[in-house]
Amino acid sequence: MPNSFEGGCHCGAVRYTCEAEPQMAFYCHCVDCQRMSGSAFAVELMVNRASFSCSGELTAYAFDGESGPVTRFHCATCGSSIYLEAESDQTHLFVKAGSLDDPSWVRPAMHIFTKAHQPWLQINDDLPRYSALPEG
């Protein structure tokens, strides 16, 4: 994984930089990610909050997710998902891999919330699978 990376929204109004290597990438199959992505899962990068900077107007949507209270941030103009904050983890942000300028280097390390996995989606890898959040 790169030591730093950049990304933004579809229309270009929001840009971000992360000045540290992501701690991990993962597939999230929770119902919230399915609804917010319009797909069967989302791919997210766990990054250190202090290394992340963002410019442009964002809208925030807070709700109680399967992992507890979360706030999702989207471009105020085009609605692209950028990142989310989880109240249970004040150290990290979870950046949407689809918002990266170059997502080709992303290598998810696990599947989480597989209890909500859609039966029509075949998972054809040997990555660890967790019904909810992994312990620790």
Image (spheres, rainbow, N blue to C red):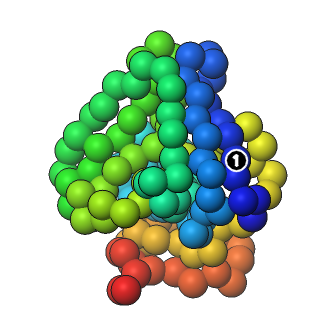
Residue at (35% x, 75% y) in the render: 132
Question: Nearest the camera: 8 or 54?
Answer: 54
Q: Quadrant of residue 65?
A: bottom left
Residue at (40% x, 81% y) in the render: 134
Relative image position of residue 56 (x, y in whole percent): 49, 21
Instruction: Decide if residue 121 is in sight here.
Output: no
> Quick one: SS at disc 1?
strand
- Residue 125 in the figure: left or right of residue 80: right
Relative image position of residue 87 (x, y in whole percent): 24, 57
Instruction: Decide if residue 136 is in sight here.
Output: yes
Q: Quadrant of residue 72?
A: top left
Say few, some or many: other residues with alpha carbon within 10 Å of mark 1 (under 14 / 14 to 19 / 20 or more). Answer: some
- Residue 29 in the figure: left or right of residue 59: right
- Residue 87 in the figure: left or right of residue 123: left
Residue at (57% x, 75% y) in the render: 110
Q: Quadrant of the N terminus?
A: bottom right
The residue beneath circle 1 is 5
Residue at (23% x, 40% y) in the render: 62
Relative image position of residue 95 (x, y in whole percent): 52, 49
Relative image position of residue 30 (x, y in whole percent): 39, 59
Q: Residue furthest top?
A: 77
Disc 1 marks a residue whose amino acid type is Phe
